[in-house]
Image: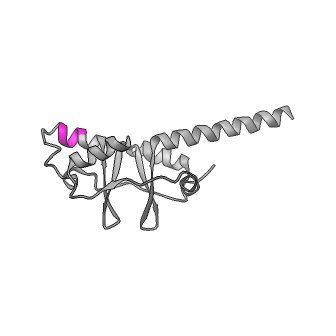
Amino acid sequence: MKNIGQFLAQHIRTIYSVSPQSTVRQALELMADKNIGALLVLEEKKLVGMFSERDYARKVVLKGKSSVDTLVQDIMTTEVICIKVSQTFTECMQTMTDHHIRHLPVMDGQNVIGLISIGDVVKEILEEQTRTIEQLKSYIVN
């Protein structure tokens, strides 16, 4: 099975982020525009938090705050669970399950090099299982 680094090398994509001083509205507009559910919060290229739809729902909507004048830094998740490029998708799935999260920043040392979603993990695991089944069928037939 591919590790996270190998996956990212084959699936090059933009890493979307906001600064801690961005408004929640700005973050939501970026998420809507890019059809994504979470953003990295970076300050001078350093990961300082994550902002997700869950943060918005629980920390803005339910608290009666306004997305126009609430800053991302006031509601972002600051204790960010990350994974390393060398980790496997099975390890990602376990981490996501253990921490009840749907997005994992991928780190190479101190640098953020990507963001993996639960959709990425499920798709990759299903593709690996399909490859294994086909190999077993081929082995049995031959």
Image position of 107 (left or right of 22) = right
- Report the label total: 0
Residue depicted at x 27% and y 58%: 19
Query: Looking at the image, is 38 positioned above or below residue 112?
Result: above
Q: Locate residue 20: give its quadrant.
A: bottom left
Residue 109, image x, y percentages: 46, 67
Residue 74, image x, y percentages: 18, 53
Residue extent of the magenta highlight: 57-61
Residue 7, image x, y percentages: 56, 52
Q: Is residue 28 magenta?
A: no
Residue depicted at x 20% and y 51%: 23
The quarter of the image holding the C terminus is: top right
Residue depicted at x 25% and y 51%: 76
Q: Main secondary structure of the magenta part?
A: helix
The residue lying toward the viewer, choosing from 14 and 42, is 14
Query: Looking at the image, is 123 positioned above or below residue 50?
Result: above
Query: Looking at the image, is 120 positioned above or below residue 71?
Result: above
Task: Give the colour scheme of this rendering.
Answer: one colour
Image position of 123 (left or right of 115) = right
Q: Is residue 60 magenta?
A: yes
- Farthest residue toward the front? 33
